[in-house]
Image (cartoon, rainbow, N blue to C red):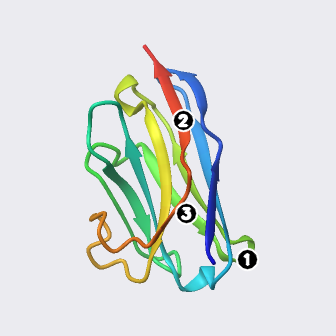
Amino acid sequence: QVQLVESGGGFVQAGGSLRLSCLVSGGTFSSYTMGWFRLAPGKEREFVAAIGWGGGTSCYADSVKGRFTISRNNAKNTVFLQMNSLKPEDTAVYYCAKRGTIVQAMKVNGYDSWGQGTQVTVSS
């Protein structure tokens, strides 16, 4: 059974930075495409970023391009989301998830395991 555990969320002022981590246990981490999504109150779950199994392919939502960076360490079964220049509209619960391929990685469908989420709050 695959388990995903996010960490690194918190409270930060606008313009600040946070680094989220997602530790994956069970299965073969190096074969997974990993994604980050976020859920804000009153909104639908939103794609943030995804990274292919080798780390050489990634994609981002337009709203975070140039500010967020996704990376992974396959030796440590961990995927990261470095978030810089944070804005109040980035406030949400952030979730990591896994799927088999980076094709259509922006879509929620296809992700078969999810973490419990970590809260990110950005004050203005």
Three-letter code, disc 2: Gln
Three-letter code, disc 1: Ala
Count neighbours of disc 3 (C-alpha within 10 A) and say few if under 14, some if 14 to 19, many if 20 or more. Answer: many
**Residue found at the far top of this picture:** 124
In-front residue for pair 28/51: 28
In-front residue for pair 11/14: 11
Mark number for residue 71? 3
Disc nearest the viewer among 2 and 3 = 2
| On screen, residue 15 above or below 40 | above
Toward which corner of the image does residue 76 lie, by quadrant? bottom right
Determine which residue is flagged by label 1.
Answer: 75
- Give the mark nearer the N terminus: 2 vs 3: 3
**Residue found at the far right of this picture:** 76
Determine which residue is flagged by label 2.
Answer: 119
Position of the C terminus, as image quadrant, is: top left
Q: Give the CA distance from mark 2 to mark 3.
A: 20 Å
Q: Are marks 3 and 1 in contact (CB under 8 Å)?
A: no
Secondary structure at numbered mark 2: strand
Q: Position of residue 52 (x, y in %)?
A: 45, 76
**Residue found at the far front of this picture:** 1
Q: Is residue 11 left or right of residue 64?
A: right
| On screen, residue 88 above or below 77 | above
Q: Is residue 104 visible?
A: yes
